[in-house]
Amino acid sequence: AQSVTQPDIHITVSEGASLELRCNYSYGATPYLFWYVQSPGQGLQLLLKYFSGDTLVQGIKGFEAEFKRSQSSFNLRKPSVHWSDAAEYFCAVEAGNNRKLIWGLGTSLAVNP
Amino acid sequence: SQTIHQWPATLVQPVGSPLSLECTVEGTSNPNLYWYRQAAGRGLQLLFYSVGIGQISSEVPQNLSASRPQDRQFILSSKKLLLSDSGFYLCAWSVRDRQPQHFGDGTRLSIL
């Protein structure tokens, strides 16, 4: 069965430091991959997506993610974190054209001033 | 541009009372529509999705039901709420299969 794993439940970084959030998926072929961000009490906002082509994708708010087929990973990165980036981040996978996304459990990001 | 409206933002209901949450999408036609529930620390659980008027797929057996009376309207209902129905409910839409989903601001439902 397809699955998505976000190994880090909670991460704390200092403002201005770099960030990498991990996402691993289980699926035989190349899935469609997404990263979303959720601020407290809010809905989810799409940060970026990967469907095909260049494995390094750029998103909004200065985020990027790299698809690595050999590692079944789609890690999210940002070179310099801002205090406003504190939020919950979700990785999701659409695998098999079944109209449904498979979601990771999320990584909570805290940013120290 | 497309927008999604979800209301109410918060709702406090007694056990055994009915429920109706509404979601509407503007600026697109025949979207896929989704209802999710999010429990604290447990990610998103897909409850229902719809690919057209009157077409509802249920993902988990539960005390809830969904309806799509109009192309861009999606309603989540219950006849009798349980304590376990508490949570954060999110509506989402996508332009078609295998496309990103876009979310409303959610409804925080508390059952007393």
Image (tube, coloured by chain):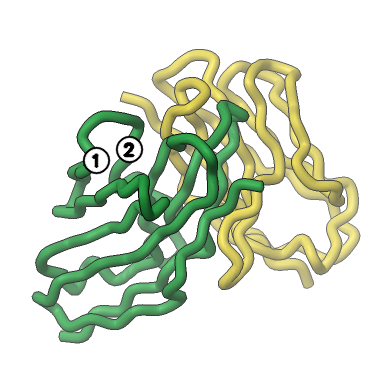
Chain colours: A green, B yellow
**Dot 1: within a 10 Å radius of its alpha carbon, few (fewer than 14), some, or many (20 or more) residues?**
some
> Residue B15 falls in which quadrant of the image?
bottom right
Residue at the location (20% across, 47% down)? A60
Label 2 close to label 1 by CB (< 8 Å): yes
Judge depth for marks 2 and 1 and give the one in front: 1
Residue B31: give its label.
Answer: none
Q: Which amino acid does label 2 sit on?
A: Tyr
Residue B46 coordinates in the image, percent (x, y): 65, 46
Residue at 48 percent of width and 27 percent of height: B98
Residue closer to the observer: B23 or A24: A24
Q: Quadrant of the C terminus of chain B?
A: bottom right
Q: Which chain's residue wears label 1?
A: A
Rendered location of residue A54, percent (x, y): 21, 35
Q: What residue does disc 2 label? A: A50
Amino acid at pointer 1: Thr
Look at mark 1 in the image and give the residue it sits on: A55
Check the image and report above or below for A65 versus B74: below
Q: Residue at x 60, y 47 (%)?
A: A2
**Residue nearest the observer in this picture, A14 or A24:** A24
Q: Name the residue nearer the viewer: A14 or B64.
A: A14
Point out residue B107 in the picture as x, y percentages from the top left corner: 58, 54
Figure check: B106 above or below A15: above
Left or right: A13, with A41 as reference point:
left
Q: Earlier in the sequence, mark 2 or mark 1?
A: 2
